[in-house]
Image: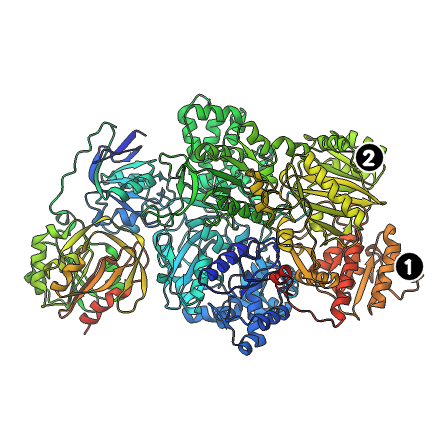
Amino acid sequence: MVLGSGPIVIGQAAEFDYAGSQACRTLKEEGLRVVLLNSNPATIMTDSEFADRVYLEPLNAEVASAILREERPQGVLPTLGGQVGLNLAVQLAEAGILDELGVALLGTAVQTIRRAEDREEFRALLGELGEPCPLSTAVRSVAGALAFAGEAGFPLVVRPAYTLGGTGSGVARNLDELGAVVAQGLVQSPVGQCLVEQYLEGWREIEFEVVRDRRDNCVAVCGMENLDPMGIHTGDSVVVAPCQTLGDREYQVLRAAAFRIVRGLGVEGACNVQFALEPRGSRYQVIEVNPRVSRSSALASKATGYPIAAVATRVALGYSLDEIAGLAGTACSEPVIDYVVAKVPRWPFDKFARADRRLGTQMKATGEVMGIDRTVEGALLKAVRSLEMGGPGLFRPELTGWSESRLREVLARPDDRRLFLLAEACRRGLGEEDLAGLTGIHPYFIRRLGLLAGMAAEVAGGDLLADAGLMRRVKRAGFADRELACLAGKTEDEVEGARLALGIKPVYKMVDTCAGEHATGAPCYYSTYEEEDEAPRGEEPSVLVIGSGPIRIGQGIEFDYCSVHAAWALREAGVRSLVINNNPETVSTDYTTSDRLFFEPVTREEVLDLVQGQAPRGVMVQFGGQTAINLASTLDRAGVRVLGTQPRDIDRAEDRASFEELLAELGVARPPGKAVRSAGEALAAAGELGYPVVVRPSYVLGGRAMEVVHDPAELEALAGEVDWSHPVLVDRFIWGREVEADAIADGEQVLVLGIMEHIEGTGIHSGDSLSVYPPRSLDRATRRRLVDLTTRLALALKVKGLVNVQYVLAGGEVLVLEANPRASRTVPLLSKVTGLAAVRVATRIALGETLAGMGLPAGLWPEPVYVAVKAPVFSWAKLPGVDTGLGPEMKSTGEVLGLDYYFAGAMARALEAAGCRLPRPGGTVAFSVADRDKVAATALAGEFARGGFELAATAGTAAALQEAGLPVRAYRKLAEGSPNLVEGIRAGDLDLVVNTLTRGKEPWRDGYQIRRAAVERGIPCFTALETAAAVLTAIRERRSGRAFPVRALQDYLQGTA
Amino acid sequence: MATGWLVLEDGTRFEGRLFGATGGARGEVVCNTGVTGYQEVLTDPVFCGQIVVLSYPVIGNLGASPENCESARPHLRGLVVRQLSEPRDNGGGSLERFLSGHGVVGLEEVDTRALVRHIRETGCLRGSITWSPEGAAEAAEESADWVDQVTTRRPYRIYGDGPRVVVLDCGLRNGMLKTLTDRYDCDLTVVPAQTAAADIMDFRPDGVLLSSGPGDAGRLGHLVGTVQDLLGRVPVFGIGLGHHLLGLALGAGTGRLKFGHRGLNHPVREVASGRVFITAQNHGYVLEENSLGKAGLEITFRSLSDGTVEGTRHRDLPVSGVDFHPQARPGPEDAVKAFEPFWNLIHR
């Protein structure tokens, strides 16, 4: 049995799908029957071919125990599912169920996990081994921390025990800060424990990925160096491999220490060891270990070609490393690399403009990218353009206007822009030592940026288009055509034209674990500007799948799932699959997924070079989310054959003005709206349409900057954030129910895969809604109408592949919100629940097959008798300052699925899997709602009261409830003093908060304060009444005493549950 | 910087830019895959007379400093890298100055991966670094005795309280001495390679260590003779070339590896325990397995990559050796216990 890691949250992302799918595949290769528990439907590992029994159920001890009883596996593999899987395994072991059933815990033992995870035990072990570590103590109270500070001094770093991605961690420089951080940390730690530790400010941070087997063979897969010094979470640090500022002696000292620790712990499998190393010397301190696969092990695997998770799985089964085959020899050989990789985190601050963007010990990045090149500079440049942050590259024109004092200030208090700010500072000629002092970044790295700044100046001052020597040098250094164009004041086309005329083209080199020493079959490549091209240019037909880049809010693991399926489908169709992507966490960048993987930025330049070099039959753009779709017309114009839906048709759907025309032709209704190009036009349009309106910019990702606006003042404020270079649509906001349909079309026929209904009403992004499949409240006529509309739209848009259409149902009418002719977020989920591998079908259609040819029907795919509820998962706790109120801007980072034969059961499972702490009757539910919601809220409150809950409310809402005869505890507004709702939340008097949005997003408003207070206390807080009603459904279900049987996906699909 | 070429004897050319000492360089072209420890590699006398290609592309981050030297100076003829990265406050100046100061010719901006892959197929070739693309790929002269060029000119002693060990310096690396002194507190006398067995025995050693060194032991008949004279009189341990000398002295044969084992990641299996150690290696020759039996040698370590012999010991005599570098520097010290059998024989 494999324990997965659940939904994607900040600190725990796609790396565990990569690890878990490798584990499942390895177990199957060993001829074992695989039982999998994971609640995340967007993952590859939960595909029914990856495990014999897939349980899409909440990851808790109760569920896991039931599955253990049902399936009776011989062993449990605990170390592949991140911290969630590890914690669950420890719980199971402690509950005695493993012993009772005679189930072995495979690989690293529970005692080892405990010794590594419990700070006190770990420190004791380090003491025994004579390994240095910072002075620290574990506390269970604020008083304990304050006492320790008296002895250890400041600064101190506080880390709560057993949390994800350093949740709740922080630096304290005085007693006040210490009190605040510890209080928060104690709440966040599931065991109510915090480690308070001396803060090694400015020390280098080095990580080792080590694998050990039970015969005590040990290999160091990779040593990695963080560019950012201690104090910035490694998940938020730029990381390079191999280490750059360490000599062999320092490197070996750390490697040997890592081995001693891993041996001392008795790890059998993978382990990550983190060190702090003096800024200039070779003294070190041990910071922490993770006795499992991790984000870093995924990075190390991708950086070296050594599949840590697969090896760790075999080690857990009892193999020794020398018995496990590797790319070049056995797994008992240490990889050596002949290139440099740079990992750069992807942060969500483009979407959360109001969030605190400063970096510290608490991870904030949602994803990451990796660049590979032969030099540090080249790898960094590639990683930076893989981020898709807009702008030309490393040297950002918008920073040239910053004053030096502002630059210095932000560099000294690092935030997500620091790499760009450093580049800007280098461009201005600020000294290496100066910048090193300011940032704590080793001067070596600043010098590399300085080198690039020097070249940038040469380009700006020279004649790039005519200077072949310069062109060669800057391309070799890793500059993109686009950045060169910006520096030289030319267009990208001009630079590209001049470059190609000079015959300057990249070659592809292999990632082979052995620096070319042995011939290997590793099909993973990166581009560089050198002599020899190693990528075979096969005679066989091939197709390039464009991947989705880093995981970010609005473009998550779902699109990696789709890319992976597309690559598989190509292989099945006898076509060589080429994949281009740059996200080191994912399955699509596992070199076994495709025939050839190209680890590259997903930009026009790289894709065109690749098409040039590999001459594929065509490219697939519909599976890689917005990243790939955005390239469609560019590629088309460059003469590249796009397979499937054609770029002009994609454009017709994406550009809202032309989409409107199409709808008019089809006679389909849509909310009245206008395309506008300025703030003035927007105000006029809104006045005409009537408030509220939804403002939607074209080419959006996850609805960025999309907002429901209630009055002109709000509209004016929003207009300042909008990119006016594309038309912006102002639509009448229609209050109603939202449904969406996913369909596959071949140009002749349309198969509607499924219709999902959102639980919340319009105005909340589909990615943030609870939704249910099959829809529960649609009558047959509406359903027919939706299938008909979807079919006609797909045909009109000449879709060849996947399409997602979103609808609003209002006043008995069906209106179209948008159509996206590409794989959507819900495709993996629907594929799983229907048992129809939609991406594979779409891929084959793009290759020229038809639905009929594949024996597939048109119309709506038969809906099952079981119910699937998708619940969004948010990472609020990781993002201080972010408003948790939901709206048309997507905010969730992941999702879970609940499956049952009854709606209430599916809802309960989904909410539990999403980590929602369902309150028990007797608990208190607080209401604070907008005037327009008072009637509905009163009805809902009545339901809660009848369910045995106490009620509380803010003054206005309380009055409404009292009027309805409901007993309610009233709280004051914040400004009116005690007792107010925020105090009630902090005091732990409330168990659930329902707070619907009033207008405005200003942080000083009561609603915002209430919502953040709830996040900090870990109390569920919902901003839509429908969500709260769904929660009540789930609570009732869980109190009903009805059995809560666990069922595998296979049982549902085969009707055997 | 001037354009230069590495021209191989098979006619293949690799373009780059010259750095370091002026002039050309000729020698056998060998590849080292170590990611760390470039300066230790450069100063390893085993590379005497060779042109070394470093597969890791970024070289020079730490400049050059005396404490990273494994011998008094670099002995290689030429260095080929992808990128010579500028050094900074390393206390010892830049790598380029270090190389030019010692007459080593460098070639940077070379597609070193293509070069490594080429040599992987052809086997080690001779070649020259030249400033002219037409530069002939003349065969480098094969010195009969590289060891003579790198060995110490006179004996010296490093005092310790442990067993007395005479080290026959065939191209010694400081790390070997450091391990014997720091780890075992040996009382060391380092003697030139030409030292006769009788003179070695005059030091009344508890054991003799035959160091690693450059070239083919098969061409060092006089040294084989010296070793033969030592056998049976004192415990002997050989590393690399020293191990090969031991084997030859006992009647085993040596052979040449196509590509050589040069790097810091080579797994070897200890035959007795089955355990695998990651080792630093730097050898182009090995003892031939089928010749070991008649020499009375049994295999103690074997390469996990290609199965070749990495360590042996004699069935009766107190004699053993390894091809890898248990003392590391550069590289991992995982297999430092390979010294143990020797240590067990010499202390008390």
Identify residue type, mark 1.
Answer: Ala
Residue A422 image point, x, y percent:
52, 40
- Marked residue chain, label 1: A
Work out whether disc 2 and disc 1 sit on a shared chain: yes
Given residues A74 and A163, the one toward you in this image is A74
| Residue at (34% x, 41% y) in the render | B113
Residue B128 image point, x, y percent:
22, 35
Q: Secondary structure at mark 2?
A: helix
Given residues B97 and B169, the one toward you in this image is B169
Q: Secondary structure at mark 1?
A: helix
Residue B163: name its quadrant.
Answer: bottom left
Q: Is residue A922 above or below residue B57?
A: below
Q: Which label number is shown at residue A959?
A: 1
Q: Which label number is shown at residue A686?
A: 2
Q: Is A147 situated left or right of B69 in this image?
A: right
Q: Is A66 situated left or right of A506 in this image?
A: right
